[in-house]
Amino acid sequence: MTTTVIKNGTIITADLTYKADVLIEGGKIIGIGPDLAGDEVLEAEGCYVMPGGIDPHTHLEFPFMGTFSADDFDYGTRAALAGGTTMVVDFAVPAPGQSLLDAYKAWHNKSARARCDYSFHMAVTWWGEQVFEEMKEVVGLGITTFKHFMAYKGSLMVNDDELFASFKRCAELGAIPLVHAENGDIVAEMSAKLLAEGNTGPEAHAYSRPSQVEGEATNRAIMIADMAGVPLYVVHTSCEEAHEAIRRAKMNGKRVWGEPLIQHLTLDESEYANPDWDHAAGRVMSPPFRNKKHQDSLWAGLASGTLSCVATDHCAFTVEQKRYGVGDFTKIPNGTGGLEDRMPVLWEKGVNTGRITMNEFVAVTSTNIAKILNCYPKKGAVLVGSDADLVVWDPKASKVISAKTQQSAIEYNVFEGIEVHGLPRYTLSRGLLAYADGKVLAPEGHGEFVARAPNGTVNRALSTWKELTAPRPVARAGIPASGV
Ligand SMILES: NC(=O)NCCC(=O)O
Ligand SMILES: [Zn+2]
Ligand SMILES: [Zn+2]
Protein backbone atom coordinates (compact mmCIF):
# COMPACT_ATOMS: atom_id res chain seq x y z
CA MET A 1 0.00 0.00 0.00
CA THR A 2 1.27 3.50 -0.83
CA THR A 3 2.39 5.61 2.12
CA THR A 4 2.38 9.39 2.44
CA VAL A 5 4.57 11.39 4.77
CA ILE A 6 4.05 14.96 5.93
CA LYS A 7 7.58 16.27 6.51
CA ASN A 8 9.11 19.02 8.62
CA GLY A 9 5.89 20.44 10.06
CA THR A 10 5.02 21.43 13.62
CA ILE A 11 2.16 19.36 15.01
CA ILE A 12 -0.49 21.32 16.89
CA THR A 13 -3.02 19.39 18.92
CA ALA A 14 -5.46 20.52 21.58
CA ASP A 15 -2.73 20.13 24.20
CA LEU A 16 0.68 19.81 22.49
CA THR A 17 2.97 21.67 20.08
CA TYR A 18 5.99 19.77 18.72
CA LYS A 19 8.00 19.14 15.57
CA ALA A 20 7.48 15.71 13.97
CA ASP A 21 6.72 14.03 10.66
CA VAL A 22 3.43 12.18 10.15
CA LEU A 23 3.26 8.88 8.23
CA ILE A 24 -0.01 7.77 6.65
CA GLU A 25 -1.15 4.48 5.16
CA GLY A 26 -4.60 3.13 4.29
CA GLY A 27 -6.30 6.32 5.41
CA LYS A 28 -4.85 6.15 8.94
CA ILE A 29 -1.91 7.73 10.75
CA ILE A 30 0.64 4.93 11.24
CA GLY A 31 3.62 6.86 12.56
CA ILE A 32 4.56 10.16 14.20
CA GLY A 33 8.19 11.05 14.81
CA PRO A 34 11.41 12.43 13.39
CA ASP A 35 12.84 11.55 9.97
CA LEU A 36 9.98 9.40 8.68
CA ALA A 37 9.99 8.31 5.03
CA GLY A 38 7.08 7.55 2.71
CA ASP A 39 6.31 6.97 -0.98
CA GLU A 40 4.77 10.41 -1.35
CA VAL A 41 6.05 13.47 0.45
CA LEU A 42 4.07 16.54 1.45
CA GLU A 43 6.37 19.36 2.52
CA ALA A 44 5.22 21.17 5.66
CA GLU A 45 8.29 23.30 6.47
CA GLY A 46 7.05 26.48 8.21
CA CYS A 47 3.55 24.98 8.53
CA TYR A 48 1.41 23.59 11.31
CA VAL A 49 -0.06 20.08 11.05
CA MET A 50 -3.41 19.96 12.81
CA PRO A 51 -6.44 17.67 12.98
CA GLY A 52 -8.81 18.58 10.15
CA GLY A 53 -11.66 20.78 11.27
CA ILE A 54 -15.02 19.33 12.25
CA ASP A 55 -18.02 21.57 11.66
CA PRO A 56 -20.76 20.28 13.94
CA HIS A 57 -23.53 22.40 12.46
CA THR A 58 -24.40 22.51 8.76
CA HIS A 59 -27.59 22.52 6.68
CA LEU A 60 -26.77 21.24 3.20
CA GLU A 61 -29.64 21.05 0.68
CA PHE A 62 -31.97 21.75 3.59
CA PRO A 63 -35.70 22.16 2.80
CA PHE A 64 -36.46 25.30 4.79
CA MET A 65 -38.79 28.30 4.57
CA GLY A 66 -40.23 27.29 1.22
CA THR A 67 -36.97 26.49 -0.54
CA PHE A 68 -33.78 24.40 -0.29
CA SER A 69 -30.47 25.78 0.95
CA ALA A 70 -28.33 26.30 -2.14
CA ASP A 71 -25.16 24.44 -1.13
CA ASP A 72 -25.67 20.69 -1.32
CA PHE A 73 -23.26 18.03 -0.05
CA ASP A 74 -21.05 18.54 -3.11
CA TYR A 75 -20.68 22.33 -2.83
CA GLY A 76 -20.74 22.27 0.95
CA THR A 77 -17.98 19.72 1.36
CA ARG A 78 -15.87 21.39 -1.36
CA ALA A 79 -16.08 24.53 0.74
CA ALA A 80 -15.24 22.54 3.87
CA LEU A 81 -12.09 21.01 2.39
CA ALA A 82 -10.91 24.32 0.91
CA GLY A 83 -11.12 25.79 4.40
CA GLY A 84 -9.39 22.92 6.24
CA THR A 85 -12.55 21.18 7.48
CA THR A 86 -12.61 17.40 6.97
CA MET A 87 -15.91 16.44 8.59
CA VAL A 88 -19.32 18.07 8.70
CA VAL A 89 -22.29 17.14 10.86
CA ASP A 90 -25.54 17.91 9.09
CA PHE A 91 -29.10 17.97 10.47
CA ALA A 92 -31.61 15.43 9.19
CA VAL A 93 -34.86 17.31 9.76
CA PRO A 94 -38.18 15.48 9.41
CA ALA A 95 -41.18 17.67 8.64
CA PRO A 96 -43.64 17.67 11.54
CA GLY A 97 -45.49 14.35 11.36
CA GLN A 98 -42.83 12.75 9.15
CA SER A 99 -41.02 9.56 10.15
CA LEU A 100 -37.49 10.06 11.48
CA LEU A 101 -36.43 7.08 9.38
CA ASP A 102 -37.76 8.73 6.21
CA ALA A 103 -35.75 11.83 7.05
CA TYR A 104 -32.70 9.65 7.59
CA LYS A 105 -33.17 8.07 4.13
CA ALA A 106 -33.51 11.48 2.49
CA TRP A 107 -30.29 12.71 4.11
CA HIS A 108 -28.52 9.45 3.37
CA ASN A 109 -29.34 9.93 -0.33
CA LYS A 110 -28.25 13.55 -0.42
CA SER A 111 -24.98 12.85 1.35
CA ALA A 112 -23.84 10.44 -1.37
CA ARG A 113 -22.23 13.48 -3.01
CA ALA A 114 -20.03 14.35 -0.02
CA ARG A 115 -16.31 14.86 -0.66
CA CYS A 116 -15.36 14.64 3.02
CA ASP A 117 -16.63 12.56 5.91
CA TYR A 118 -19.88 13.48 7.57
CA SER A 119 -22.28 12.50 10.29
CA PHE A 120 -25.86 13.47 11.11
CA HIS A 121 -27.86 14.88 13.98
CA MET A 122 -31.58 13.98 13.88
CA ALA A 123 -34.17 16.69 14.59
CA VAL A 124 -37.22 16.06 16.77
CA THR A 125 -39.84 18.37 15.26
CA TRP A 126 -42.95 16.71 16.72
CA TRP A 127 -43.72 14.23 19.46
CA GLY A 128 -45.63 10.94 19.70
CA GLU A 129 -45.28 7.19 20.19
CA GLN A 130 -43.74 6.83 16.73
CA VAL A 131 -40.98 9.36 17.44
CA PHE A 132 -40.32 7.74 20.81
CA GLU A 133 -39.85 4.33 19.13
CA GLU A 134 -37.93 5.59 16.11
CA MET A 135 -35.37 7.44 18.23
CA LYS A 136 -34.02 4.07 19.30
CA GLU A 137 -33.65 2.96 15.67
CA VAL A 138 -31.95 6.23 14.82
CA VAL A 139 -29.41 5.62 17.58
CA GLY A 140 -28.90 2.14 16.10
CA LEU A 141 -27.99 3.84 12.82
CA GLY A 142 -25.14 5.71 14.53
CA ILE A 143 -26.95 9.02 15.11
CA THR A 144 -26.78 9.83 18.81
CA THR A 145 -27.62 13.54 18.86
CA PHE A 146 -31.17 14.94 18.61
CA LYS A 147 -31.88 18.56 17.74
CA HIS A 148 -34.85 20.54 19.06
CA PHE A 149 -35.98 23.88 17.70
CA MET A 150 -37.42 26.13 20.41
CA ALA A 151 -38.12 28.69 17.67
CA TYR A 152 -39.80 28.64 14.20
CA LYS A 153 -43.30 28.53 15.69
CA GLY A 154 -45.80 26.84 13.41
CA SER A 155 -43.18 24.76 11.62
CA LEU A 156 -40.25 23.13 13.42
CA MET A 157 -40.77 24.38 16.98
CA VAL A 158 -41.46 21.99 19.86
CA ASN A 159 -42.98 22.99 23.22
CA ASP A 160 -41.65 22.40 26.72
CA ASP A 161 -43.63 19.18 27.32
CA GLU A 162 -42.25 17.77 24.05
CA LEU A 163 -38.74 18.90 24.97
CA PHE A 164 -38.98 17.20 28.34
CA ALA A 165 -40.31 13.96 26.82
CA SER A 166 -37.63 13.90 24.15
CA PHE A 167 -34.81 14.82 26.57
CA LYS A 168 -35.88 11.96 28.86
CA ARG A 169 -35.82 9.60 25.88
CA CYS A 170 -32.32 10.84 25.01
CA ALA A 171 -31.24 10.08 28.59
CA GLU A 172 -32.57 6.50 28.30
CA LEU A 173 -30.83 5.99 24.96
CA GLY A 174 -27.49 7.50 26.00
CA ALA A 175 -27.99 10.24 23.41
CA ILE A 176 -27.39 14.01 23.62
CA PRO A 177 -30.13 16.58 22.94
CA LEU A 178 -29.24 19.77 21.06
CA VAL A 179 -31.29 22.95 21.14
CA HIS A 180 -31.80 25.96 18.95
CA ALA A 181 -32.59 28.17 21.92
CA GLU A 182 -34.87 31.10 21.16
CA ASN A 183 -38.32 31.68 22.67
CA GLY A 184 -40.42 31.04 19.56
CA ASP A 185 -43.69 32.35 21.06
CA ILE A 186 -42.16 35.73 21.83
CA VAL A 187 -40.37 35.93 18.47
CA ALA A 188 -43.67 35.24 16.67
CA GLU A 189 -45.49 37.94 18.60
CA MET A 190 -42.75 40.52 18.20
CA SER A 191 -42.48 39.77 14.48
CA ALA A 192 -46.22 40.30 13.97
CA LYS A 193 -46.08 43.61 15.86
CA LEU A 194 -43.08 44.85 13.88
CA LEU A 195 -44.76 43.98 10.59
CA ALA A 196 -48.02 45.66 11.67
CA GLU A 197 -46.03 48.82 12.47
CA GLY A 198 -44.46 48.86 9.01
CA ASN A 199 -41.09 47.34 9.93
CA THR A 200 -40.83 45.01 6.95
CA GLY A 201 -37.10 45.15 6.10
CA PRO A 202 -34.30 42.75 7.09
CA GLU A 203 -33.31 44.97 10.04
CA ALA A 204 -36.60 44.01 11.70
CA HIS A 205 -35.42 40.39 11.80
CA ALA A 206 -32.85 41.42 14.41
CA TYR A 207 -35.38 43.50 16.38
CA SER A 208 -37.72 40.49 16.50
CA ARG A 209 -35.17 38.25 18.26
CA PRO A 210 -33.27 40.23 20.91
CA SER A 211 -30.73 38.52 23.12
CA GLN A 212 -33.32 38.08 25.90
CA VAL A 213 -35.28 35.52 23.85
CA GLU A 214 -32.11 33.49 23.46
CA GLY A 215 -31.02 33.84 27.09
CA GLU A 216 -34.44 32.79 28.38
CA ALA A 217 -34.69 29.76 26.10
CA THR A 218 -31.12 28.68 26.81
CA ASN A 219 -31.71 28.75 30.54
CA ARG A 220 -35.05 26.93 30.14
CA ALA A 221 -33.48 24.18 28.03
CA ILE A 222 -30.65 23.78 30.56
CA MET A 223 -33.11 23.36 33.43
CA ILE A 224 -35.28 20.93 31.47
CA ALA A 225 -32.22 18.86 30.54
CA ASP A 226 -31.12 18.84 34.18
CA MET A 227 -34.53 17.53 35.25
CA ALA A 228 -34.42 14.93 32.46
CA GLY A 229 -30.95 13.86 33.59
CA VAL A 230 -29.22 14.37 30.26
CA PRO A 231 -26.30 16.52 28.98
CA LEU A 232 -27.21 19.40 26.67
CA TYR A 233 -25.53 20.97 23.63
CA VAL A 234 -26.70 24.49 22.79
CA VAL A 235 -26.18 25.38 19.12
CA HIS A 236 -25.33 28.85 17.82
CA THR A 237 -24.85 30.56 21.19
CA SER A 238 -24.72 34.20 20.12
CA CYS A 239 -25.06 36.41 23.18
CA GLU A 240 -23.96 37.08 26.74
CA GLU A 241 -27.34 36.10 28.24
CA ALA A 242 -27.15 32.61 26.70
CA HIS A 243 -23.46 32.31 27.53
CA GLU A 244 -24.21 33.42 31.10
CA ALA A 245 -26.79 30.64 31.46
CA ILE A 246 -24.31 28.08 30.11
CA ARG A 247 -21.47 29.41 32.27
CA ARG A 248 -23.62 29.33 35.40
CA ALA A 249 -24.83 25.81 34.65
CA LYS A 250 -21.28 24.58 34.10
CA MET A 251 -20.12 26.18 37.35
CA ASN A 252 -22.97 24.33 39.07
CA GLY A 253 -21.81 20.99 37.73
CA LYS A 254 -24.36 20.65 34.92
CA ARG A 255 -23.18 19.05 31.69
CA VAL A 256 -23.80 21.73 29.09
CA TRP A 257 -21.84 22.79 26.02
CA GLY A 258 -22.19 26.01 24.02
CA GLU A 259 -21.37 26.49 20.35
CA PRO A 260 -20.68 30.01 19.06
CA LEU A 261 -20.63 30.53 15.29
CA ILE A 262 -17.77 32.21 13.47
CA GLN A 263 -20.35 34.70 12.15
CA HIS A 264 -21.45 35.81 15.64
CA LEU A 265 -17.83 36.08 16.80
CA THR A 266 -16.80 38.41 14.00
CA LEU A 267 -19.78 40.14 12.34
CA ASP A 268 -22.21 42.54 14.00
CA GLU A 269 -25.72 43.95 13.80
CA SER A 270 -24.64 47.02 11.81
CA GLU A 271 -24.86 44.74 8.74
CA TYR A 272 -28.67 44.95 8.98
CA ALA A 273 -28.59 48.74 8.61
CA ASN A 274 -26.89 48.47 5.21
CA PRO A 275 -28.89 50.50 2.64
CA ASP A 276 -28.58 47.62 0.17
CA TRP A 277 -31.52 45.27 0.88
CA ASP A 278 -29.70 42.26 -0.60
CA HIS A 279 -26.68 42.90 1.63
CA ALA A 280 -28.79 43.07 4.79
CA ALA A 281 -31.01 40.11 3.84
CA GLY A 282 -27.93 38.04 3.05
CA ARG A 283 -27.00 38.35 6.74
CA VAL A 284 -30.44 37.33 8.05
CA MET A 285 -30.01 34.30 10.22
CA SER A 286 -31.25 33.14 13.61
CA PRO A 287 -30.06 34.19 16.09
CA PRO A 288 -29.13 37.46 14.37
CA PHE A 289 -25.73 39.14 14.47
CA ARG A 290 -25.25 41.09 17.70
CA ASN A 291 -22.86 43.74 19.07
CA LYS A 292 -19.33 43.98 20.46
CA LYS A 293 -20.42 43.30 24.04
CA HIS A 294 -21.79 39.93 22.98
CA GLN A 295 -18.79 39.19 20.77
CA ASP A 296 -16.39 39.87 23.66
CA SER A 297 -18.42 37.48 25.80
CA LEU A 298 -18.18 34.72 23.18
CA TRP A 299 -14.42 35.19 22.79
CA ALA A 300 -13.97 35.06 26.54
CA GLY A 301 -16.01 31.84 26.58
CA LEU A 302 -13.69 30.22 24.05
CA ALA A 303 -10.59 31.29 25.98
CA SER A 304 -11.95 30.17 29.33
CA GLY A 305 -13.56 26.95 28.11
CA THR A 306 -17.13 27.88 29.05
CA LEU A 307 -17.91 27.69 25.31
CA SER A 308 -16.69 24.60 23.53
CA CYS A 309 -16.93 24.53 19.72
CA VAL A 310 -16.96 27.01 16.84
CA ALA A 311 -19.39 26.08 14.05
CA THR A 312 -20.89 27.77 10.98
CA ASP A 313 -24.57 26.74 10.78
CA HIS A 314 -23.76 26.80 7.03
CA CYS A 315 -27.17 27.30 5.40
CA ALA A 316 -26.57 29.31 2.26
CA PHE A 317 -29.29 30.97 0.16
CA THR A 318 -28.90 32.81 -3.12
CA VAL A 319 -29.88 36.46 -3.60
CA GLU A 320 -33.00 35.32 -5.43
CA GLN A 321 -34.00 33.03 -2.57
CA LYS A 322 -33.44 35.79 -0.01
CA ARG A 323 -35.74 38.04 -2.07
CA TYR A 324 -38.73 35.84 -1.14
CA GLY A 325 -38.81 38.15 1.85
CA VAL A 326 -39.04 41.53 0.09
CA GLY A 327 -41.84 43.37 1.90
CA ASP A 328 -41.96 40.83 4.78
CA PHE A 329 -38.78 40.07 6.71
CA THR A 330 -40.32 36.91 8.22
CA LYS A 331 -40.19 35.31 4.76
CA ILE A 332 -36.46 35.88 4.20
CA PRO A 333 -34.91 32.38 4.34
CA ASN A 334 -32.81 32.29 7.51
CA GLY A 335 -29.19 31.30 7.09
CA THR A 336 -25.69 32.26 6.01
CA GLY A 337 -22.63 30.44 4.66
CA GLY A 338 -19.26 30.01 6.34
CA LEU A 339 -17.83 26.52 5.79
CA GLU A 340 -14.83 27.66 3.76
CA ASP A 341 -14.09 30.59 6.06
CA ARG A 342 -14.60 29.24 9.59
CA MET A 343 -11.00 28.15 10.19
CA PRO A 344 -9.19 31.02 8.37
CA VAL A 345 -11.39 33.70 9.99
CA LEU A 346 -11.06 32.13 13.45
CA TRP A 347 -7.30 31.94 12.98
CA GLU A 348 -7.12 35.57 11.83
CA LYS A 349 -9.43 37.05 14.48
CA GLY A 350 -8.55 34.58 17.24
CA VAL A 351 -4.99 33.26 16.97
CA ASN A 352 -3.40 36.19 15.14
CA THR A 353 -4.86 38.64 17.68
CA GLY A 354 -3.86 36.54 20.70
CA ARG A 355 -7.46 36.01 21.83
CA ILE A 356 -6.95 32.23 21.71
CA THR A 357 -3.91 29.98 21.46
CA MET A 358 -3.17 27.65 18.56
CA ASN A 359 -4.00 24.71 20.83
CA GLU A 360 -7.32 26.28 21.78
CA PHE A 361 -7.94 26.79 18.06
CA VAL A 362 -7.57 23.04 17.51
CA ALA A 363 -9.75 22.30 20.51
CA VAL A 364 -12.66 24.48 19.41
CA THR A 365 -12.52 23.66 15.71
CA SER A 366 -12.04 19.90 16.02
CA THR A 367 -11.07 18.01 19.18
CA ASN A 368 -13.77 19.17 21.58
CA ILE A 369 -16.62 18.28 19.25
CA ALA A 370 -15.04 14.92 18.38
CA LYS A 371 -15.09 14.13 22.10
CA ILE A 372 -18.65 15.40 22.61
CA LEU A 373 -19.89 13.40 19.61
CA ASN A 374 -18.03 10.29 20.75
CA CYS A 375 -15.92 9.92 17.62
CA TYR A 376 -12.57 10.81 19.24
CA PRO A 377 -9.78 9.80 18.56
CA LYS A 378 -10.94 8.46 15.18
CA LYS A 379 -11.53 12.14 14.40
CA GLY A 380 -10.14 15.30 15.98
CA ALA A 381 -6.70 13.86 16.81
CA VAL A 382 -3.16 13.53 15.50
CA LEU A 383 -2.45 10.10 16.95
CA VAL A 384 -1.28 6.76 15.60
CA GLY A 385 -4.46 4.89 14.61
CA SER A 386 -6.55 8.03 14.01
CA ASP A 387 -8.07 8.77 10.61
CA ALA A 388 -5.60 10.83 8.57
CA ASP A 389 -7.97 13.82 8.45
CA LEU A 390 -5.36 16.53 8.63
CA VAL A 391 -4.73 20.09 7.62
CA VAL A 392 -1.28 21.43 6.81
CA TRP A 393 -1.73 25.05 7.79
CA ASP A 394 0.46 27.76 6.30
CA PRO A 395 0.45 30.74 8.70
CA LYS A 396 2.14 32.94 6.06
CA ALA A 397 -0.38 32.31 3.29
CA SER A 398 -2.96 35.05 2.94
CA LYS A 399 -5.96 36.06 0.90
CA VAL A 400 -8.82 38.52 0.87
CA ILE A 401 -12.08 36.61 1.20
CA SER A 402 -14.23 37.05 -1.89
CA ALA A 403 -17.35 35.44 -3.27
CA LYS A 404 -15.60 35.47 -6.67
CA THR A 405 -13.17 32.77 -5.57
CA GLN A 406 -15.29 30.76 -3.12
CA GLN A 407 -16.49 27.16 -3.50
CA SER A 408 -20.03 27.90 -2.34
CA ALA A 409 -22.73 28.16 -5.02
CA ILE A 410 -24.09 31.52 -3.83
CA GLU A 411 -23.16 34.96 -5.20
CA TYR A 412 -22.00 36.66 -2.00
CA ASN A 413 -20.01 35.98 1.14
CA VAL A 414 -20.75 37.46 4.56
CA PHE A 415 -16.98 37.67 5.23
CA GLU A 416 -16.30 39.50 1.93
CA GLY A 417 -13.22 41.75 2.11
CA ILE A 418 -11.70 40.29 5.29
CA GLU A 419 -7.97 39.65 4.83
CA VAL A 420 -6.87 36.41 6.46
CA HIS A 421 -3.30 35.31 7.19
CA GLY A 422 -3.21 31.56 7.72
CA LEU A 423 -4.71 29.11 5.21
CA PRO A 424 -4.62 25.39 4.42
CA ARG A 425 -1.72 24.41 2.18
CA TYR A 426 -3.02 20.84 2.08
CA THR A 427 -6.15 19.22 3.44
CA LEU A 428 -6.15 15.42 3.75
CA SER A 429 -9.29 13.35 4.11
CA ARG A 430 -8.56 9.80 5.35
CA GLY A 431 -5.10 10.11 3.81
CA LEU A 432 -6.31 11.35 0.44
CA LEU A 433 -4.89 14.69 -0.66
CA ALA A 434 -8.27 16.37 -0.82
CA TYR A 435 -7.23 20.01 -1.30
CA ALA A 436 -3.97 21.48 -2.57
CA ASP A 437 -2.80 24.53 -4.51
CA GLY A 438 -6.19 26.14 -4.27
CA LYS A 439 -7.98 23.15 -5.81
CA VAL A 440 -10.39 20.61 -4.33
CA LEU A 441 -9.07 17.20 -5.37
CA ALA A 442 -11.32 14.78 -3.45
CA PRO A 443 -13.91 13.31 -5.82
CA GLU A 444 -17.64 13.50 -5.27
CA GLY A 445 -18.67 10.54 -3.11
CA HIS A 446 -15.32 10.20 -1.33
CA GLY A 447 -16.96 11.14 1.98
CA GLU A 448 -18.03 8.38 4.36
CA PHE A 449 -20.69 8.40 7.03
CA VAL A 450 -19.27 8.45 10.57
CA ALA A 451 -21.48 6.30 12.80
CA ARG A 452 -21.30 7.19 16.49
CA ALA A 453 -22.00 5.04 19.52
CA PRO A 454 -24.32 6.16 22.33
CA ASN A 455 -23.42 6.37 26.02
CA GLY A 456 -20.28 8.45 25.79
CA THR A 457 -18.34 9.17 28.96
CA VAL A 458 -20.33 12.26 29.94
CA ASN A 459 -23.68 10.49 29.49
CA ARG A 460 -22.41 7.61 31.64
CA ALA A 461 -21.10 9.87 34.39
CA LEU A 462 -24.28 11.94 34.48
CA SER A 463 -26.58 8.90 34.62
CA THR A 464 -24.50 7.47 37.46
CA TRP A 465 -24.85 10.74 39.36
CA LYS A 466 -28.58 11.08 38.63
CA GLU A 467 -29.18 7.49 39.76
CA LEU A 468 -27.24 8.12 42.97
CA THR A 469 -29.21 11.28 43.75
CA ALA A 470 -32.65 10.06 42.53
CA PRO A 471 -35.65 10.46 44.86
CA ARG A 472 -36.01 7.52 47.25
CA PRO A 473 -38.67 6.83 49.83
CA VAL A 474 -37.60 7.18 53.48
CA ALA A 475 -38.34 3.94 55.32
CA ARG A 476 -40.17 4.73 58.62
CA ALA A 477 -40.87 2.19 61.33
CA GLY A 478 -44.56 1.32 61.55
CA ILE A 479 -45.58 3.38 58.48
CA PRO A 480 -46.37 1.33 55.36
CA ALA A 481 -44.91 2.77 52.13
CA SER A 482 -48.15 2.20 50.17
CA GLY A 483 -50.77 4.11 52.13
CA VAL A 484 -53.13 1.56 53.67
N1 LIG B 1 -29.69 29.59 11.68
C1 LIG B 1 -30.40 29.88 10.63
O1 LIG B 1 -30.76 31.05 10.48
N2 LIG B 1 -30.74 28.97 9.69
C2 LIG B 1 -30.54 27.59 9.73
C3 LIG B 1 -31.53 26.88 10.60
C4 LIG B 1 -31.18 27.03 12.05
O2 LIG B 1 -30.15 26.54 12.50
O3 LIG B 1 -31.91 27.66 12.79
ZN1 LIG C 1 -30.93 27.10 14.57
ZN1 LIG D 1 -28.71 25.42 12.18
Image: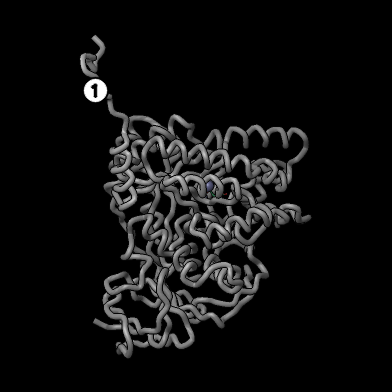
The answer to whether 26 appears left or right of 154 in the picture is left
User: For the point 44% across and 29% down, which residue is it?
Assistant: 161
- Find residue 170 and report its image quarter: top left
Mark 1 residue crowding within 10 angstroms, few (<14) / some (14–19) / many (20+)? few
Tell me the SS state at disc 1: loop
Query: In this figure, what is the number of numbered marks?
Result: 1
Question: As shown in the figure, which amino acid type bears the numbered disc 1?
Answer: Ala
Q: Choose between 463 and 159: the one closer to the eye.
A: 463
Question: Which residue is most to the front?
Answer: 477
User: For the point 27% across and 24% down, which residue is it?
Assistant: 474
Q: Choose between 452 and 61: the one closer to the eye.
A: 452
Asked if one can make out residue 82 in the rendered structure from this viewpoint, the answer is no
Please, is residue 67 above or below residue 312 in the view? above
User: For the point 72% across and 36% down, which residue is it?
Assistant: 195
Give the color scheme: rainbow, by chain, secondary structure or one colour: one colour
- Image coordinates for residue 229, horizontal then vertical, percent: 36, 39
The answer to whether 258 appears left or right of 105 in the picture is right
- Image coordinates for residue 324, horizontal then vertical, percent: 65, 46
- Image coordinates for residue 44, horizontal then vertical, percent: 44, 85
Q: Choose between 293 and 260: the one closer to the eye.
A: 293
Asked if one can make out residue 9 in the rendered structure from this viewpoint, the answer is yes
Please, is residue 6 above or below residue 243 in the view? below
Q: Choose between 125 and 224: the one closer to the eye.
A: 224
- Image coordinates for residue 276, horizontal then vertical, percent: 76, 56
Please, is residue 159 above or below residue 379 in the view? above
- Find residue 465 and report its image quarter: top left
User: On the image, numbered disc 1 is attached to which residue?
Assistant: 475
Please, is residue 290 above or below residue 441 in the view? above
- Find residue 215 and report its image quarter: top right
User: For the point 36% across and 47% down, which residue is it?
Assistant: 104
The answer to whether 275 appears left or right of 328 in the picture is right
